[in-house]
Amino acid sequence: MTRILLIISLWMTAGSVSAQELNLSQISTYLNSMQAATAKFVQANPDKTLAQGVLYIQKPGKIRYEYTTPADSLVISDGRALGVIDKKSNRGAQLYDLRKTPLDILLQGNIDLQSSGVVRNISSDGVKTQVIAVDPKNARNGTLTMVFTGNPVELRQWVVTDRSGKNTTVILNDLKIRNSVQSDLFDIRKAEADNKR
């Protein structure tokens, strides 16, 4: 547990962080500028294990978690389905409806946190601004907690809380906003085929 806290602390303090309380308009503008992005990440799982890897985002709806430690799984959304691929088996991806996961809020092509009705709470400690969001039409599917810093605005982490109350925390480092990301990275069928080779 001490190792987990140390790694999370190091990742959260990587780079300079300026104090600034953000509002929903600033955060929406930032998220809408992030139509494509890449980042390194550390993931703290509900069972207290850690995973690391590289993350790719292409809005609307596309995300890829490429795990390097341990390198035994791959998570891809193609904009409709969220596929979980076990690299240790030859089985196909376990598929979930992206719209029934809290990540759908973050991956919208156009985000208006002020008027969409998804924000349950916004708070700031003077350095970090935290936004708790839930789809009002699918509240039972869980919540998404996003943490931002300012000057300039940057998404630092998110926490997905599933319907059973379990948290999965993704801490970002070296987040880079891109013009686009290679489209076949989000092809679940291609990833399945590659896994069977």
Image (cartoon, rainbow, N blue to C red):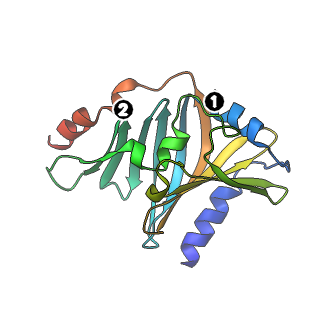
Q: Amino acid at mark 2?
A: Leu
Residue picked out by circle 1: 32
Give yes or no for contact between labels 1 and 2 (Cβ–Cβ under 8 Å).
Answer: no
Residue 165 at x, y = what percent? 48, 69
**In which quadrant will I find the C terminus?**
top left
In front of the other: 143 or 58: 143
Q: Which residue appears at 48% of the width and 29% of the height?
A: 60
Residue 122 at x, y = what percent? 73, 54
Residue 70 at x, y = what percent? 36, 59
Q: Hey, which residue is sitting farthest bottom in the picture?
A: 1
User: Foreground mark, 1 or 2?
Assistant: 1
Q: Which residue appears at 55% of the width and 41% of the height?
A: 106
Residue picked out by circle 2: 185
Q: Secondary structure at mark 2?
A: helix
Q: State left or right for residue 22 relative to residue 4.
A: right
In front of the other: 63 or 89: 63
Q: Which residue appears at 71% of the width and 57% of the height?
A: 13
In the image, is residue 47 above or below residue 30? below
Q: Which residue appears at 58% of the width and 78% of the height?
A: 2
